[in-house]
Image (tube, rainbow, N blue to C red):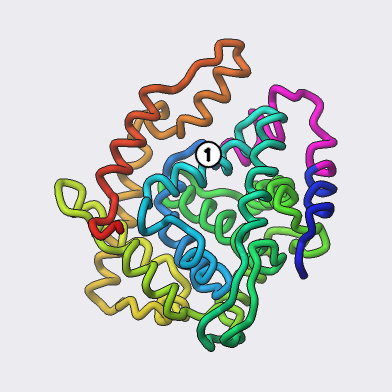
Amino acid sequence: MIVTQSQIERRIDEATARVTDRRVGLFGPGSMTWRISRESIVFLGAGRAALLQLAHPFVAHAIEQHSATRADPVGRFNRTFLHVYGMIFGDLDSVIGAARRVRGVHDRIHGPIDEDVGAYHRGQRYTAHDEGALLWVFATLIETSVMAYELGIATLSPAEKNAYYEESKLFAALFGIADAALPPDWPAFKAYCADMASSDALAVGRPALDTARFLLTPPRGALAPLMRGYGALTTGLLPPRVREGYGLPFGPGEQASFQRTLRGVALGWRHIPERLRWVPDYVEARRRLDGRPRPDTLGRAVQQRILDGIKPQRAG
């Protein structure tokens, strides 16, 4: 099913109609969405989410044909999360503006698949407004955020996971995804993710392999050892069938590296001061609600320094 412009606008209206304070936006303090999304640890799952998304041929071909990922990976990261965090932490005007900008970008993304892969055939047309692909991208972000949060912050109860998922339906609505397309609760959502990972709806083809090879190439310099650990973490968190599709080895040595990384994250992350763990968008949102809006210059500088340090060497 293709999500139309009128459907997106209707879903945006439905999601934002319940907002009582325009300054707070869609979620606000006390929400599970802010509690999880404020933590920079969610970026430890970015590799997993990206590879799962690329395993959908519509997504992989769209990124290859329309994205600046390889020419400007840091810039694409910043643009993507400008929209995502605008929806999560912004005031109501920012939420609506970000949703409409994403819709405008998606309007231009369409084209043909150039290979037979999984359930898809050469010449089949894709669009960024395909509801099935949108649902899968949304699902990878939500599932992986919970996984990453639990790696280093705290284990979430079933009730907390269900509350987070229920809130995330508002986020899905901003992309035009219909309520009927969304699994009803967290257990059903997890079942959907598992079913997708084991079905031919996901298949790692040439564009996915090419982009993954680029993204997983570690940088040179001081952060190289950390990025090797990040690669081990990404590999270990993938569902086995998808990991095998990428040809990522996971023998005894890789499994040992994965377990060491898990232990390091679990032991070390909780000792990082909250101010350094929190993403700048959350800090700025709290300042806005406290009546003293100003940029988080420290957080932005640290974030940019890290992004520059982990940038793959073969950009271009």
Residue occupying the point 53% across, 88% down: 116
Q: In this view, does 8 lie to the left or right of 94?
A: right
Q: Quadrant of residue 29?
A: top right
Please state the extent of the stretch shown in magenta in the rendering.
13-36
Q: Name the residue under label 1.
A: 82
Quarter of the image with the N terminus is bottom right
Residue furthest to the left: 221
278 left or right, relative to 104: left
Q: Nearer the viewer, residue 286 or 149?
A: 286
Amino acid type at mark 1:
Leu
Disc 1 on helix, strand or loop?
A: helix
Q: Which residue is at a point 66% across and 49% down the rendered structure image?
A: 104
| Residue 16 shown in magenta | yes
Identify which residue is drawn at 83% across, 35% down: 18
**Crowd band around label 1 with a 10 angstrom C-alpha radius: few (<14), some (14–19), many (20+):** few
Does residue 221 sit above or below 259 in this rendering?
above
> Image point 79% across, 53% down: which residue?
5
224 w.r.t. 298: above or below: below
Q: Nearer the viewer, residue 225 or 312?
A: 312
Quadrant of the image containing the C terminus: bottom left
Q: Magenta: predominant secondary structure element?
A: loop
Residue 276 x/y as whole percent: 37, 30
**Residue 249 at what x, y percent from top left?**
30, 78
**Residue 312 lies in the magenta-colored region:** no
